[in-house]
Image (spheres, rainbow, N blue to C red):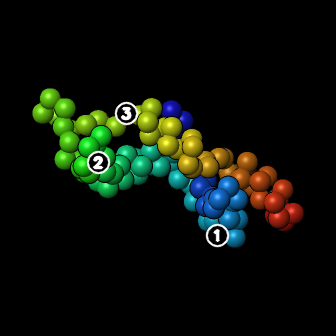
Amino acid sequence: MILDQAVVIPVYEGVPILKAWQARPLASEALHGEIATALRTRASVRTKGDEMYKLSQLQIDGSPIDISDDIIEDIKVRLCFVTSLKRGKQIQVSWTGCC
């Protein structure tokens, strides 16, 4: 798991929205924590019988279901574009020809 500083750039349908981004030194660890919290508090699970349950309500052997770091890392890799500030500036230049 990569836990160093990163810059977050909003991406819509695969296209970076460079006009909307703000340079904020956000740690990948913070992003990891936000995804984990969102899953624990908002995620729902559908059973084979089409019943819906909040993830926070489900337990295995009396303990809450643990969301593995591998699952959260997979979500970050597939859905979040995280890069260094230097790389972010290179992308901005290549897309806009500016700064």
Question: Which mark is on residue 68?
Answer: 3
> Callout 1, which amino acid?
Ala
Are the two marked residues, 2 and 3, in contact with CB atoms closer than 8 angstroms?
no
Q: Residue at x 70, y 59 (%)?
A: 15
> Callout 3, which amino acid?
Ser
Between marks 2 and 1 in the image, the one whose residue lies nearer the viewer: 2
Q: Position of residue 3 (x, y in %)?
A: 51, 38
The picture quadrant where one finds residue 96 is bottom right
Viewer can see residue 23: no
In the image, is 10 to the left or to the right of 90? left
Between marks 2 and 3 in the image, the one whose residue lies nearer the viewer: 2
In the image, is 93 to the left or to the right of 56? right
Q: Is residue 73 above or below residue 91?
A: above
Badge 2 density bin: few <14, some 14–19, many ≥20, Cα 10 Å:
few
Viewer can see residue 80: yes
How far is the residue under mark 3 from the one under mark 1? 32 Å
Furthest toward the left, the residue is: 62
Residue topped by disc 1: 20
Q: Residue at x 29, y 53 (%)?
A: 41
In the image, is 37 to the left or to the right of 9? left
Between marks 3 and 1 in the image, the one whose residue lies nearer the viewer: 3
Question: Which mark is on residue 77?
Answer: none
Badge 1 density bin: few <14, some 14–19, many ≥20, Cα 10 Å:
few
Q: Position of residue 8 (x, y in %)?
A: 59, 55
First in sequence: mark 2 vs mark 1: 1
Q: Is residue 2 above or below residue 81?
A: above
> Callout 2, which amino acid?
Asp
The picture quadrant where one finds residue 21 is bottom right
First in sequence: mark 3 vs mark 1: 1
Residue topped by disc 2: 50
Q: Residue at x 52, y 44 (%)?
A: 76
